[in-house]
Image: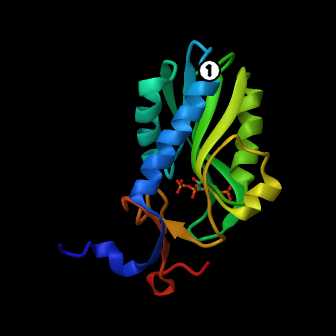
Amino acid sequence: MQARWYEADIERVIVTEEQIREKTADLAKQVAADYGSVNELLLVCILKGAVMFMADFTRELGRIGPPLELEFMSAASYGQGTTSSGVVRVRADLDRSIAGRHVLVVEDIIDSGLTLSWLLKYLASRGAASVEVVTLLRKPEAMRSAPPLKYVGFDIPTEFVVGYGLDYNERYRELPYVGVLRPEAGAAS
Ligand code: PRP
């Protein structure tokens, strides 16, 4: 088979397609069990990185969980580089009220935890009945600074990762797995 263009840029794969598939199904089962008694659940995808996970997770949960509604927000903590700036900027806000709703934030990665800490306060201030978080990936720093999370896919090392929604300067989001970029491909972690 012909090599894909990005393979030369990836040092190693840390979460495979198969692992993502299995973990997404597991997380959906846990969420379905915990929300068995609610009338509906509002999934809030944090763009852009969570878009792949949101689509796959929603399909899994849709088969076994309560009725779902989908909302999208864009809140960025990174600039153009590879480390958190510490500044959260809302690029696109929710366009409907979440008052009284059960909200599940869908994230691709919790790194410094800054984005999430800000988001949880923001969503609570908008009157959600409950707010929980499901994230595919979590880095060690987040365990110190972000609140404890119920639904975490993989704890990964402190390295700059791309793929399955995660980018480096807007590239590599389409990769079907999560991998570490070779330093010469541009990311100095
Ligand atoms: C990423 C990720 C989280 C945030 C986590 O988004 O999707 O929202 O960073 O970082 P933190 O825990 O250090 O705050 P990013 O700002 O890169 O935007 P993008 O998803 O549009 O690429």
Instruction: Classify the position of the C terminus by image quarter.
Output: bottom right
Q: Quadrant of ligand 1?
A: bottom right
Give me the residue at 37% from left, 59% from top: 176
- Is 150 above or below relative to 186? above
> Amino acid type of disc 1?
Ser
- Whether residue 69 sits left or right of residue 4 in the image: it is right
Binning the other alpha carbons within 10 Å of mark 1 as few (below 14), some (14 to 19) or many (20 upward) gives few
Q: Secondary structure at mark 1?
A: loop
User: What kind of colouring is applied to the model shown?
Assistant: rainbow
Residue 160: quarter of image: bottom right
Residue 21 spot, x, y in % from top left: 42, 48
Q: Is residue 93 visible?
A: yes
- Whether residue 1 sits left or right of residue 177 in the image: it is left
Q: Nearer the viewer, residue 19 or 9?
A: 19
Residue 88 spot, x, y in % from top left: 69, 52
Q: Nearer the viewer, residue 118 or 156?
A: 156
Residue 110 spot, x, y in % from top left: 65, 54
Residue 167 spot, x, y in % from top left: 48, 63
Give me the residue at 51% from left, 31% from top: 71
- Whether residue 85 sits left or right of residue 106 in the image: it is right
Direction bottom: furthest residue: 184
Give me the residue at 49% from left, 59% from top: 166
The residue that mark 1 highlights is 97
Instruction: Classify the position of the N terminus by image quarter.
Output: bottom left
Residue 73: quarter of image: top right
- Whether residue 108 sits left or right of residue 12 in the image: it is right
